[in-house]
Image: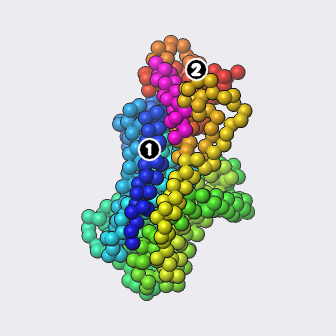
Amino acid sequence: MNLKIENRALVLLFFLVLCPLILLSFYTYPVGVHDWDWLVFFEYEELSFIQFQTLMYEKYTGRFASTLLLSTSPYWINLFTYKLIPIILLLSMTASLYILFRQLFRYFNNTGINTWVPTLAFIVILIQGLSGIYEFLYIISSSFTYTVAFILLNFWLALFIVLHQRFSIFPFFTLLLITIALNGWNELYLLFINLMLVHFIGWKIWNKKKVPAWIWITLIISLLSGLTEALAPANFIRINAYPGSGDILKTLFLTVAALGSNLISWIANTTLGLMTIALLPVLGQIAKIIPQKTLNRKSILTFISLSLSWQIVPLLLLFYSCGPNSMPERVVDTLYILFLSSFFGGVLIFIKKYKLFDFKIKNSLLKTGLWVFIGTIILFNPIKIKRDIPPPTSLQPKELFQFLDVRNNTGTAWLTLLDGSAKEYATFNQNLFEEIKNCTSDTLWVEPPAFPKIIYEPIFDRKHKAGNNRISIYFENKIDRIIYKKETK
């Protein structure tokens, strides 16, 4: 099947989506909570590296693996390397997905499908559907804890496929290391990896197939490392700090409400629906290579069970342990990634079951029009004209674009670049750093800038209320606090 139009369209959409995010990386700066905190360890400078890990495990978080990574921040992250992190994450995410799909197609003895097609499609749909792209890419405490875990999960799955095809010592030990890391990265991926292993072993036993020893060893190592994370003293301290935790009825209600809200918002995603239709020829090719014997009733029920478990179990545990105030965007987006996997898995099963392999739009002009329409949706839907703003009086980008409001990730990213707000924000930070270096008083009052979207979130910025002193410590000037003028009475 000739898929030249699909291939070219996906490459263009991929660059349309990634280019503004990469360009915005050069305008991003550490903000406050958890960014400057990790870059400046002045409270713990007398502790050794190991002592600091022990302190975090006992008093702050059981996430021993992501804490280990974040603890290296002062040794290699500065104002320049900080800007490279979102770019590295985007490229690593793309590479890990490519490796995963390549191994999957090799497992089914098919190398005729262009691996880049599902890779680029997944990235485009993922970026468009994220509810918190700032937390996903531009703040290290979140991106190192969740986005890096997603990348590791892709490598883990690729290794699992390799080992299931043919056992080898080096891939096995690499798989075990990533297994331990994922269990210690955050609680969601701890659940995901163990649920996958339990379901896979259950599927094997149900179908009266032998479970290889290396899978049992992986499960045991996974459970032990998962218990190490879950039973950390710090986790119980955090649970006790949340009001409303431990209420079973409230937990059930919140789980049903959150699950319904998430599914509705994800399924109603215009980009997901249109891209699925446009990709049906590609999905048909992929479904064709899946052996029919693997799609028996037991396999389908196992798939449904895993898909539901991925969504329900994390929500139940989250609301039970942390109460109603525990659904940050990074959690929703992690569940969204798993939803996409389940969604496209379901589409492939449907195509295979009803043998819809040869769906295609024969008219090339109509096919091209569909992809152009998808690109337009990605850029402009939904777009709003701000009618309460006076017309522009000059050709400055800020005035030309100030009346536009685009409410999707890609459109907003491009608008943030074009309206000059990202550049203004960068200039503000450079001036702020110079003021910090020259300040001799205990408090530095600064005029707040016009904050850009995508690369800034006010909830993380201490300068709005309490003030931020970590920035000054980074520049070796221990000002008590830095605070925005209009935010202080």
Residue holding disc 1: 19
Q: Few, some or many C-alpha atoms within 10 Å of disc 1 (few <14, some 14-19, many ≥20)?
A: some
Q: What is the span of residues highlighted in magenta in the rendered image?
A: 414-434
Report the label total.
Answer: 2
In the rendered structure, does residue 415 fall within the stretch colored magenta?
Answer: yes
Which of the marked residues, 1 or 2, is nearer the chain's N terminus? 1
Q: What quarter of the picture does the N terminus occupy?
A: bottom left
Q: Position of residue 282 (x, y in %)?
A: 44, 68
Up the image or down, 25 lies above or below 126; here it is above
Up the image or down, 422 lies above or below 170; here it is above
**In the depicted view, which residue is nearer to us: 477 or 247?**
477
Three-letter amino acid code of the residue under disc 2: Val
Q: What quarter of the picture does the C terminus occupy?
A: top right
Does the image show residue 333? Answer: no
Q: Position of residue 26 (x, y in %)?
A: 43, 35
In the rendered structure, does residue 161 fall within the stretch colored magenta?
Answer: no
> Marks 1 and 2: which is nearer the front?
1
Badge 2 element: strand
Residue at 60%, 58% in the rendered image:
269
Badge 1 element: helix
Q: Residue furthest bottom?
A: 208
Magenta span: helix, strand or loop, mainly? helix
Residue holding disc 2: 446
Q: Position of residue 29 (x, y in %)?
A: 47, 33
Q: Position of residue 221 (x, y in %)?
A: 40, 65
Does the image show residue 147? Answer: yes
Q: Is residue 47 left or right of residue 301?
A: left
Q: Residue furthest left?
A: 169
Q: Few, some or many C-alpha atoms within 10 Å of disc 2 (few <14, some 14-19, many ≥20)?
A: some
Q: Is residue 415 left or right of residue 102?
A: right
Residue at 41%, 81% in the rendered image:
291
